[in-house]
Every structure is written in C-alpha cells, then in structure tokens.
Image (tube, grey):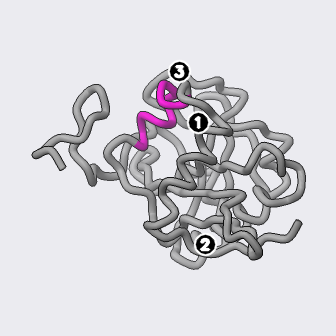
Amino acid sequence: MLWEIRAESTSDEAAVERLVDAGFGPGRFAKTAYRLREGVAPDTRLSFVAENPETHGLVGAVRFWPVIVGRRLALLLGPLAVDPKLRGRGIGIALMQRGLEGARALGYESVVLVGDEPYYAKVGFKKLKSGQIRFPGPVDGNRLLGLALKDGALETLSGDVQRARIDIAVSAQAAKLGPPS
C-alpha cells in the first residue's frame, strides 16, 4: 500500500481522533504526556497525516506540542498513530521524519517524548540521562527520550517539563470552559 504525507487540515480532526483511539484507547488521557497537552494546541505547522491516495482515508498521523523544559522551548512528540492493521510498513517513521524536518526548519532545538527506544531510535532519539528532565507526573524514566535538532541541544536540556502556553481554558476535568457551543 502506498501513502502520501500531507499537512493535517481541520477537516481531518475526526479521522485523526479515530486513529489515536485505535492505537492508544481512552486510557491515554490519564498519562502524564496528555496532561501537558490539555489546553494547548499543537504546533499546526508540524501536524501531518498519511493518506491513502486511492481512498483518501487516513492511515497515520503525528503532532508536536510546544513545551518548556527548564527554561528552554522544546517540542513534545505525539501522539504518533498508525492504523493498527498497517503498522510495520514505515508510515510512522515517515511521519516523524517529516515533522522533525519541519521542526528543524522552524528553529526548534530539541524534541522529547515518552516511548520505546528501539522504535524511536530509528529516527535518532536516544534515552535521556536519569533525572535530566522531570515530567509533572509519573513517567517511566527508561522511556524518556530526546532528540537534538541543533548540535549540543540535548546536553543543555534539563529541568521540569511544563506547558509552553495555554490556548484553550480547561477545567480540572479537561472540559473546555466558556459558553456552550
């Protein structure tokens, strides 16, 4: 099967959510990385989808979110979602490569994530030193990975990971605040 990578559009939202649900299920919302995404919009310049050119159905998606690590702006990769029936065909790697190229071109210096090192090492991620960065909740330190987009960026990256900004006001239960839509 062939696929084409393109920028995510607002009309892709429901299809992207279906891919993420299929890959991670509802339990993902309890994870620390999701806490950092609540109320924050991804960098839309770095949101990409893989589309089947024949059916125009989405087969993969990736997003990157701005975070602050210590006092430095960085990116949090994820979720990276691929149709479970199509895993192992290079879709996820291609999506990450496209996003990382874009992040480098935009001047970002580093990307962090919580994931499996053998998979993410294929695009250059490596395990961070114990205690180098601290997420605001429970995270398996063996799954904290980083990638330098600029020489030496990982060596100077340290500290607490927090939201870079708040774009959408949310309550403690992650419900959007404001008038009903």
Write the residue at 30% across / 52% down: 165
Q: Is residue 14 above or below residue 119?
A: below
Write the residue at 42% across / 39% down: 36
Instruction: Inspect this view and state whether residue 131 appears.
Output: yes
3D distance between C-alphas at marks 1 and 2: 22 Å
Q: Residues within 10 Å of mark 3 (few under 14, many from 20)?
A: few
Q: Which mark is residue 104?
A: 2
Give the residue at mark 3. Answer: 138
Query: Residue 61 at what x, y percent from top left?
Result: 63, 58
Left or right for 170, reference 69: left
Foreground of the two, 152 or 75: 75
User: For residue 34: magenta?
Assistant: yes
Q: Which mark is residue 132?
A: 1
* Quarter of the image where one finds residue 172: top left
User: For residue 45: magenta?
Assistant: no
Report the span colored magenta.
Answer: 28-37
Quarter of the rendering occupied by the N terminus: bottom right
Q: Earlier in the sequence, mark 3 or mark 2?
A: 2
Q: Earlier in the sequence, mark 3 or mark 1?
A: 1
Q: Residues within 10 Å of mark 1 (few under 14, many from 20)?
A: some
Q: Earlier in the sequence, mark 1 or mark 2?
A: 2
Q: Marks 2 and 1: in contact by CB < 8 Å?
A: no
3D distance between C-alphas at marks 3 and 2: 29 Å
